[in-house]
Image: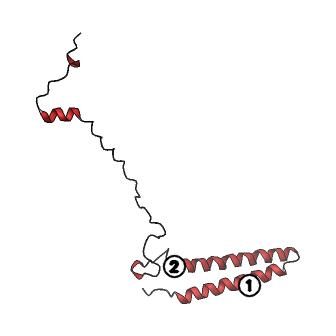
């Protein structure tokens, strides 16, 4: 067995000698792959354009107008379902329904008014 590898290599350059003498350099950390979303939100800020900005006007399914109209229609459908359920209970002879019927009538008026105002405030676009 030879110990030739254990002997130091002769250095013929001052630059190489200085490189051997100093501490080894740190290798840069490997780059992690970015995820699909690298958005970092600032504190207290909402992404997107400010409210009321017509430069970021949304149209279609998620516009304010469509959401308001859908909410009003959903409220009307719920009021009609409640009316049907109350009618069935009254027909079956259940007593004490008068307060519930009055409350349901007020709710249907509110939802109907919301539906009418949402349709008046946001007319259908002309094609």
Mark 2 secondary-structure assignment: helix
Identified at 13% across, 34% down, the residue is 14
Measured Cα–Cα span from mark 1 to mark 2: 25 Å
Q: Is residue 75 left or right of residue 35?
A: right
The residue that mark 2 highlights is: 64
Identified at 61% across, 84% down, the residue is 115
Q: Quadrant of residue 56?
A: bottom left
Q: Is residue 16 left or right of residue 42?
A: left
Which badge, 1 or 2, comes first in the chain's sequence?
Answer: 2
Query: Where is the N terminus found, in terms of image quarters?
Result: top left
Q: Position of residue 81 (x, y in %)?
A: 71, 75
The residue that mark 1 highlights is: 106
Q: Quadrant of residue 88?
A: bottom right
> Looking at the picture, does residue 100 appear above or below residue 9?
below
Identified at 87% across, 77% down, the residue is 96
Q: Nearer the viewer, residue 32 or 108?
A: 32
Mark 1 secondary-structure assignment: helix
Q: Position of residue 94 (x, y in %)?
A: 87, 74
Residue 67 numbered tag: none
Q: Nearer the viewer, residue 94 or 71?
A: 71
Q: Nearer the viewer, residue 18 or 81?
A: 18
Q: Residue furthest bottom?
A: 120
> Looking at the picture, does residue 13 appear above or below residue 70?
above
Image marks 1 and 2: residues in contact by CB distance under 8 Å? no
Identified at 23% across, 18% down, the residue is 6
């Amino acid at each position: 067995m030879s110990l030739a590898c254990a002997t130091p290599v002769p250095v013929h350059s001052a630059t190489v000698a200085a490189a051997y003498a100093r501490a080894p350099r740190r290798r840069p950390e490997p780059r992690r792959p970015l995820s699909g979303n690298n958005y970092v939100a600032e504190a207290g800020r909402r992404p997107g354009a400010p409210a009321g900005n017509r430069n970021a006007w949304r149209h279609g399914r998620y516009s304010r107008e469509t959401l308001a109209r859908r909410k009003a229609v959903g409220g009307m459908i719920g009021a009609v379902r409640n009316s049907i359920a109350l009618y069935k209970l009254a027909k079956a002879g259940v007593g004490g329904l008068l307060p519930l019927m009055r409350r349901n009538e007020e709710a249907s008026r509110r939802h109907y008014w919301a539906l009418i105002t949402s349709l008046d405030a946001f007319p259908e676009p002309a094609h």
